[in-house]
Amino acid sequence: MASRDLQEYRRKRDPALTPEPFGGPGQTGGSRFVVHKHSARRLHYDLRLEIDGVLKSWAVPKGPSVRSHEKRLAVHVEDHPLEYAGFEGVIPEGNYGAGPSIVWDAGRFRLVKPEPAREQLERGKLEFELFGFKLRGRWTLARMSGKEREWLLLKKADGYAGETEPIERFPESVLSGLTVEELRDGPKRVETLRKRLVELRAPRAEIAPRGELLMLATLVDEVPSDPAWLFEIKYDGVRVLASRADDHVELRGRSGQVVTSRYPEVTAALRALPLPRFLLDGEIVALDDEGRSSFQRLQERMGLTSPADIERAEAEVPVSVVFFDALGLDGHDVRGVPLEARKECLKLLLPARGVASYGDHVGGHGAEFLAAACERRLEGVVAKRRASPYVAKRSKDWLKIKCQLRQEFVIGGYTTPQGTRAHFGALHLGLYENGELVYVSKVGTGFDDRTLELVSEKLRPLARATSPFARGTPGGRGHHWVEPRLVGEIRFSEWTRDGGIRHPAFLGLRDDKRPEDCVRACAAR
Ligand code: MN
């Protein structure tokens, strides 16, 4: 078996007759995986792993099982080009594999053993860990003795093994949210959604996407307990307003900046959704190995603007988007509709698991929900009034309750590095109080070599001779001052009585927040 062989793939297909992609072998080094659910002559699942610039592929008739050591036949089939990872469509009658095929799961994988994948394949045993939307944890592919194409796929016993089968619980695509039947016959859910929008008397109106449209939550200490509230996870990423008008898709950050080109996997998923017009509110997230949204991991994507850098990072740090609200749906303005009804409509549009997914909520037990979120080391929870309309301002109908204290601070300077450290020692932080920038603290931990370099590159052109702080500037030597234009997110244990912070750690730069919005909001608690 040649390692990069797409001849068999091409021999079986005619580019004039099938919508499937026909790229050549791609760059090596990526680690994507994808599982197609393919309703051909017989329904099956195709597991594909990116190895040596192609997608090594196995057809699994019964699909993957998460029951530990439940063996599933996996027939090794021809290599597919890398572009096939994003292919979803109906292969017309008369072609090889005719029928609908959806991207049932996708993500990245990691080999358990250090030997090159090619060697492990030749030996007939591949152990790997999957980081997908539905399949996670450790898996084994083992060739049956004496066979060439027949392998077995099985789930190793770990925290991700279990009795509830993802193939039953989550039948939809992680791209379009459609099942194979819906891809073939058209989605009935969209008809239901359109009827519902009329019943709800949502007016027909187009909303021009602008950052200032976003509804913002008020930070509080206590979870409300009465039944008027529902509770969502507070996602640790960047807020985004996503709009679509037919093929035109746009992503805007909090302050209105267009960030569409930074997240190509998100825009591809938005185009795949079965509704041509929408304006949705959500959060772009990068998941860590435990499946939690990680702002620190997202830092590796946030600042990238060159397409080559983005393409490289997309393989290592894939992002997804969780939508928790809708402003516009199918040409209707739904901002006046109660939150719970807006979310019911949103749920008809989006899959529970996927690149663009629905952000679910719980109906009560807010305190227990917060405790569970903190236990999982999430950022916190958001409480929302069930009956509230969507308004473009910070509102008391949305409350955020955090597990740890975190806030954005303005960076006004830095100290000379000590010892072996490069670039700077600590950053000087401040907050606005009555229009004046007031010194709060310095932060010297939370940096690695990469962030030290990144931050100092951004500080260098902002240098100025005098402190930008109106009050509280520290005395002594070794201080350097900058124009107060950069915003950093800082985690800390508590506010001190004199307005300082304890145990601060740097989490990352926020280019989606404005310095003048960094105010002393919750110091006096
Ligand atoms: Mn197939």
Image (cartoon, helix red, strand yellow):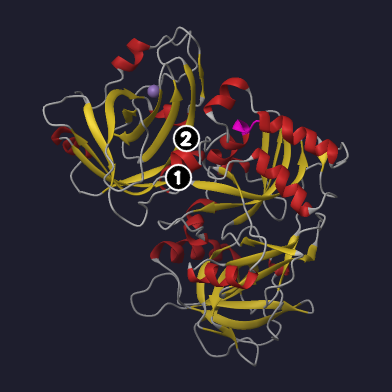
Q: Is residue 161 left or right of residue 344?
A: left
Quadrant containing the N terminus in the rendered view: top left
Give the spatial CA distance, label 2 vs label 1.
9 Å
Ligand 1 quadrant in view:
top left
In the foreground, 385 or 450: 385
Quadrant containing the C terminus in the rendered view: bottom right
Residue 305 in picture, x, y percent from top left: 55, 45
Residue 21 in picture, x, y percent from top left: 45, 20
Q: Are marks 2 and 1 in contact (CB under 8 Å)?
A: yes
- Residue at mark 2: 104
In the foreground, 451 or 341: 341
Q: Tell me which amino acid carries mark 1.
A: Lys
Looking at this rendering, what residue extends furthest in the bottom direction? 497
Q: Is residue 335 left or right of residue 358?
A: right
Looking at this rendering, what residue extends furthest in the front direction? 163
Q: Is mark 2 within 8 Å of ligand 1?
A: no
Report the magenta stretch's main SS: loop
Tell me, yes or no, whether the highlighted magenta stretch contains residue 393: no
Residue 136 in picture, x, y percent from top left: 38, 49
Q: Earlier in the sequence, mark 2 or mark 1?
A: 2
Residue 370 in picture, x, y percent from top left: 59, 70
Q: Residue 407: tell me if it is visible.
A: no
Residue 134 is marked as 1
| Mark 1, other Cα within 10 Å: few <14 / some 14–19 / many ≥20 | many
Which residue: 80% across, 61% down?
Answer: 393
Residue 424 is marked as none
Which residue: 34% across, 44% down?
Answer: 109
Q: Is residue 371 left or right of residue 146?
A: right
Figure label count: 2
